[in-house]
Amino acid sequence: MKGISNLLVAEHAEVREVMRSLDQSGLRIVLVVDAKGILRGVVTDGDLRRALLAGATLDDPAFKVMNRAFVALHAETPRDEVEMHLSNRISLVPLVDDNGIPIDVVVHNRRHYIPAAEPLFEGNELNYVIDCVESGWISSQGAYIRRFESLFADYCGVQDAVAVANGTVALHLALRSLGVGVGDEVLVPDLTFAASINAILHAGATPVIVDVLPDTLTIDPAAVESAISPRTKAIMPVHLYGQMCHMDALCNLAQRHGLLMVEDAAEALGSREGGRHAGTFGDAGTFSFFGNKLITTGEGGMLLFRDPAVASRARMLRDHGMDPQRRYWHIEVGYNYRMTNLQAAVGLAQLEHIDALLAAKLRLAARYRIGLSGLEPLIELPTTRQGTLHSYWNFPVLLMSTVDQRVRDDLMQRLREAGVDPRPLFHPLHEMPPYRDLHRQGECPVSSSVSRRGFTLPSSPKVTDAEADYICGTIRRELDRQNWREQIKTGAGGCSA
C-alpha cells in the first residue's frame, strides 16, 4: 500500500481533500477507503465535477461523491486479464489483497508504458528552432552555437566551452587535443559505456582497464595507482550514472605522477563535488546531450578545457584542422565534429531551464528512495558521497550479492510486463569481445558482480510521483511473491509465479 499512498482518501475526508489528492496524484483518480483500509469507491475528476454540479459542497465527505460501481481485481490476477478491463472509459484498475485493501494499481493511458528515458521540452525549443529555419542558419554556423557554449561555460563555472557533434567525439577530441596517442596508456574504468574506451582506441592510445568501487560504482583510485606504468599518459574518470568519482584522490594521483586527466562527465551534468562542477577538475571534461541525458540536443556534446590554448586547438581540429585565420588552409588532419545551429538552439532552450530539470531528477531519486526503503538487504540503493551533489542521471538498483543474473533478468522482465522499462547496468568492458584481450589491472571482480545483479529505473523528468510509486509498488509486489525473497537470498535462478 506504501506505493499508492498518495491515491488513498478516507471515506469521511472532505471533498476539498479529494480535490487536493486528485491534483497531486497525476492520474485523475483517487481511491476511497474505510477506517480498515478497505476499498469502498473511487472518485475521478469527472465524478467530482458532476457531484459539484449536482449540489455537493467542499465540506461534504468523500463517500457522498464517490463512485461505488468500480472495477477492482485481486492482486494475483494475471496481467492480460487485468488489461481486458482497461479501456478509454476505465483508465485505472485497483488491485486489492484478500481483505479488499488496495495494494497497487494498473494504469491505462498515454503514460501506461513508463520508458527508461524521455526528454522534456517545456521551454523555447520550438521557438529557437523555428528562428534557425527562418533565418537560414541551420548548419554549423550560427548564433545559437556561441550562445549555447557561453551559457554552458557559465553554468559549469569555467571560461570557455566547445560544442561538438556528440559525447563520443568529445572524448576523442579531448584526447587528440591534449596530445594523447600511439604509445600512451590511458586508465579507464571497467564499468562504463563503450564510448569511453572506444575514444581511447580511436586516438591510437592503449586502454588499461581498472575496477570500480562497490559503493559508488566509479573508478577505484587504489586500482588506478596500481595500474600506473611508465607509459601511462592519462586517467579517464567516468562519473557513472551521475555519481562523482573520488576526484581529490584522483587529482592527487595525476599530480604526483604527472598525468593528464580527461573526465567523462557524459552522465554527470549538474553533479558537483565541493561546489565544483563535474568536468572541471581535469585537463578536459566531456559531456553528452543524447536524448536520454539531463539536457538534450538529440545528438551532441560539449568540451571543457583547463588550458585556453588546448581549447583553441580543439576548435581547429573540430573544423577539419582548418586555420581559423585562413579559410580552406588546413594545418592539421582534423575532423568534422561540429554541432549544428539547430542542435545548439535546442540545447540552449534546454539549458535555460536546467535547474528545473535537475530538481525533477532529484525529486524522482528521493521518491524512489522512499518507495524502496526497508527492502535492504534484498536490494542496495545508490549512495551519494558526502560533499557531492549526485545528479541522478540514472537510479541504479543492485540486488544482493548472492543473486544469479537470471534472477535479475526475471525481475526486469516482470517490470516490463507491468509497463515499466528497466535497463541492465553496463556490461564490464573486459567481458565484451572487442576488449577481452586488452590489458586490465587484476580481475575486476566488482564490475563483474554489480553488472550481473544491477538495473536502472526510468529516469525521465516526466516520471510523475504516481508513476514512481507504481514502479516501487511493482518491485515490492514482485519481492513479496512466493519464494522470491528466498531465491534472492540464496541466489537461485528464476522466480516462482
Image (spheres, rainbow, N blue to C red):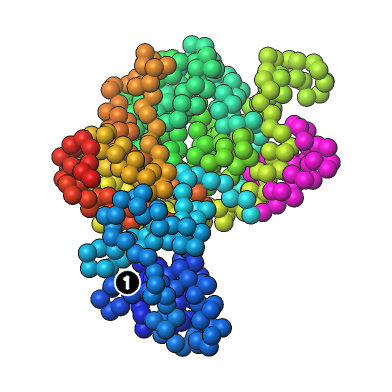
Boundaries of the magenta span: 123-152
Please report the residue visible at 29 percent of the width from the left and 39 percent of the height from the top: 410
Residue 326 belongs to magenta span: no
Is residue 376 visible to us here? no
Outermost residue toward the top in this view: 183
Residue 357: % across, % down? 55, 53
The residue carrying pointer 1 sits among few (fewer than 14), some (14 to 19) or many (20 or more) residues within 10 Å by Cα, namely many
Label 1 residue SS: strand
Q: Quadrant of residue 5?
A: bottom left
Residue 162: % across, % down? 66, 34
Residue 125 belongs to magenta span: yes
Q: Nearer the viewer, residue 448 or 100?
A: 100
Q: In the image, 174: left or right of 28?
A: right
Q: In the image, 491: left or right of 365?
A: left
Please report the residue visible at 78 percent of the width from the left and 41 percent of the height from the top: 132
Where does the C terminus fall, quadrant-wise?
A: top left
Rendered view: 98 above or below 49: above
Q: Quadrant of residue 84?
A: bottom left
Q: Quadrant of residue 72?
A: bottom left
Residue 427: % across, % down? 37, 29
Rendered view: 22 above or below 482: below
Residue with the mark numbered 1? 39
Please report the residue visible at 28 percent of the width from the left and 60 percent of the height from the top: 74
Rendered view: 108 above or below 306: below
Please report the residue visible at 32 percent of the width from the left and 72 percent of the height from the top: 39
